[in-house]
Image: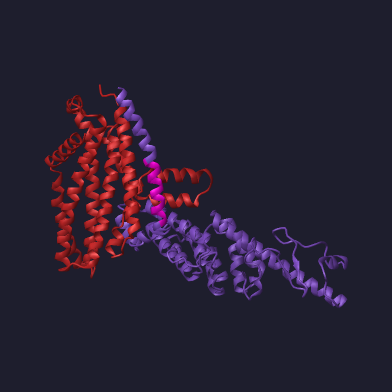
Chain colours: A purple, B red
Amino acid sequence: MKHRSKVSGVAALLVVVLLGGSILALRRVESLRGPSATLEEVLFVPSGKTLKKMSLGYSSLLANIYWTRAVQYFGARLVQNSNRYDLLYPLLDITTDLDPHLIEAYQTGSIFLAQRSPAGAAQPEKAVALLEKGITANPDYWRLYFTLGFIHYLDRKDYKAAQEAFARGAEVPGALPWMRVMAARMAERSDDIATAFSLWKAVYDNNHDKMVRDSATKHMASLRADADIQELQRRVQTYRDKTGSLPASWRDLVRAGILPGIPVDPSGAVYVLMPNGAVWVEDTKPMPFVGESFQGDVH
Amino acid sequence: MTSRLSAITLNTFREAVRDRVLYNLVLFVLLLVASAPLFSQISIGIERLILVNVGLSAMSLFGVVIAIFIGIGLVSKEIEKRTLYTILSRPVRRWEFIVGKYLGLLLTLIVNAALMTLGFYLALFLTARQYTRADAGILVAIYFIVLQFLMVTAITLLFSSFSTPIFSAIFAFALFAIGTFGEDLHNFAATASGATKWLAMGAAYAIPNFASLNVIGQAAHDQGVGGSLIVFNTIYALLYSAAVTAGAVLVFERRNLK
């Protein structure tokens, strides 16, 4: 009996020590294989249709696994500030082949694909292909038409295609009446900050994914800053016309009755007034897309 | 001690052979002989690829199935037939019985894998009519499959040391399936935050990671595997198997056999 309790003690100690050792070895294996090892392996079977046959009826479960992999792949690349997202579209394509009704993969995946690097894969054409595939499989889901119109407008600058997408979506029962308004604005080729802002606001409201919402928040903050900068520069010009010189600080404009108070950007920091009269933000981190609206671009 | 261990090991191996376990080799050869020419009829230039994929996958699956179905009976069968009492009444320690059983089943699986490897290389030669340098790289994938057997056998033995055969089989198969997706769990833990992160991380390190031992895809595509990965995968599989076997010993030592 004494011998057995001694063996038990040694065995318990061995379990702890060996398991600890195996964790250290596994960590080394992981660092040798790199974070994309699983993905590189799974893409040895690049066809979703083949995988569907191999999944023996569990294709929906496999689709969930592939969707999780796509999100993790995107998140990891985003953190690394990478501008290469080679596996993103194949992963999304496989996911939607396995489960053509996985709406989240089309909605969020297309936004991942369409956004410019480093915020996204900068592949709007592939985003459109993914959404068209989603619409074919789910023609009654109006939000897919919205995302399609959104990408045509903001990322591809194709007003006609955007108008068509919004108009097609507006016909779907249950679609918000707002879709018709967007179709009309596309027909007018409204290339203004307000249109871009309302589209990003709709993306924010219609998506539950944290990464997409974070991106939408940054876009909205950038657009608000762009609108503010445009307005502040107009007021600086008014001051110049009135006094013949540029203001040295915001106080000059307040004293002249041109501004009601010291202007602050969406992050709460005071706007920077440069000696040449140009206006900029203190820190671009909370609004990385600031200034894009002035580059002949609605971002 | 060594003679007692080797006696239990060899007896376990003999018993497995007597149970006609090696008959699976016939099915394996049939699969290999049939797959390559069959697929060459419907696709172009991928006979070798299919042969490697089918051959190695079959080797892994047959091994895992054998490990589980023999492993679940290793302890319970001895109790049922009451032969365990005869063994333990001799100067054989309980831990020697468990470790001997483990090594015996492992020996069965290694012999089985070695014979399959011979059949596989024969089929490879018949398909390509020659051997290339890349064919030697397949041996790494086979070695990793053997490392998988090391872990599966230990896991099955752990379950069989305290549970019924049917539940042991279910637990072992479930853990094998979860371990196959082990890397997904690691990736999930890496991107999660707060308590979820620590929970996922703990689970990811506690379950066996079979994903890093599966290089069948690379072998089929002639992609080499680094020397360091071979070394650390070996260390990982040995340590994990030893930890689980120690767990089985711990459970069996405390089990009331009366």
Could you say which is closer to the camera, residue A168 or residue A271? A271
- Report the quarter where the N terminus of chain A lies: top left
Could you say which is closer to the camera, residue A267 or residue A150? A267
Residue B181 x %, y %: 37, 50
Q: Is residue A22 magenta?
A: yes
A277 lies left or right of B167:
right
Q: Quadrant of residue A150?
A: bottom right
Segment colored magenta: A18-31
B84 lies left or right of A108:
left
A152 lies left or right of B132:
right
Residue A197 x %, y %: 64, 64
Q: Residue at x 39, y 44 (%)?
A: A21
Residue A66 x %, y %: 41, 56
Residue A275 x %, y %: 78, 73
The reply to whether residue A201 is in sight is no
The reply to whether residue A83 is in sight is yes
Q: Is residue B245 above or below residue A187?
A: above
